[in-house]
């Protein structure tokens, strides 16, 4: 079994293909800050600088997008979310002005579920 920590809905994949076509390579970062900072932010790849205070959770493979879309989260936020599977979705509404989807009239959000003990063990390498 291969467990993924992050996935995308078909609707989010459609939007990511459109954003990739318009802007180029993409990345996600979720900071865990207040307001829109707790939503996944979509940036041009490398536009948001990551470092030791961030955790690389996944490289999202999206059909029709030539390169994986890395998903990063602040390490502090990851401590709260490490037991969950995250799904990037898109809904109508206005998100952050810093995230690439903002002009589209939609926003990315995270849907989550608890990981099973088996999934956690695989992800943690136990």
Image: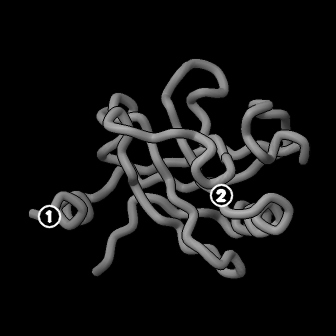
Q: How many marks?
A: 2
* Left-right relation of 31 to 95: left
**Which mark is first along the chain, 2 or 1?**
2
Residue 81: % across, % down: 37, 40
Residue 122 figure quarter: bottom left
Badge 2 crowding class, 10 Å Cα cut-off, few under 14, some 14 to 19, many 20 or more, is many
Determine the residue located farthest toward the top in the rendered image.
Answer: 34
Instruction: Identify the residue at image location x=47%, y=65%.
Output: 59
Above or below for 59 versus 63: above
In the picture of the structure, the residue carrying the numbered disc 1 is 125
* Left-right relation of 114 to 61: left
Asked if one can make out residue 11 in the rendered structure from this viewpoint, the answer is no
Tag on residue 45?
none
Identify which residue, 17 or 9, lies in the foreground. Answer: 17
Asked if one can make out residue 41 in the rendered structure from this viewpoint, the answer is yes
Q: Secondary structure at mark 2?
A: strand
Residue 74: % across, % down: 41, 35
Identify which residue, 117 or 92, lies in the foreground. Answer: 92
Residue 10 figure quarter: bottom right
Instruction: Identify the residue at image location x=55%, y=70%.
Output: 68
| Label 1 vs label 2, nearer the camera | 2
Residue 17: % across, % down: 76, 69
Identify which residue, 25 or 84, lies in the foreground. Answer: 25
Quarter containing the C terminus: bottom left
Above or below for 76 versus 81: above
In the picture of the structure, the residue carrying the numbered disc 2 is 26
Instruction: Identify the residue at image location x=67%, y=47%.
Output: 43
Residue 40: % across, % down: 60, 42
Quarter containing the N terminus: bottom left
Q: Secondary structure at mark 1?
A: loop
* Left-right relation of 48 to 78: right
């Amino acid at each position: 079994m291969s467990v993924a920590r992050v996935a995308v809905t078909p609707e989010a994949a459609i939007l990511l293909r459109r954003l990739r076509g318009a802007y180029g390579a993409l990345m996600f970062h979720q900071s865990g800050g207040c307001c829109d900072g707790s939503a996944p932010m979509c940036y041009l790849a490398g536009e948001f600088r990551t470092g030791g205070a961030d955790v690389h959770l996944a490289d999202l493979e999206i059909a029709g997008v030539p390169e994986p879309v890395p998903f990063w989260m602040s390490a502090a936020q990851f401590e709260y979310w490490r037991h969950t599977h995250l799904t990037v979705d898109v809904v109508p509404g206005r998100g952050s002005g810093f995230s690439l989807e903002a002009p589209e009239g939609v926003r990315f959000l995270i849907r989550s579920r608890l990981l099973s003990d088996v999934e956690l063990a695989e992800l943690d390498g136990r």
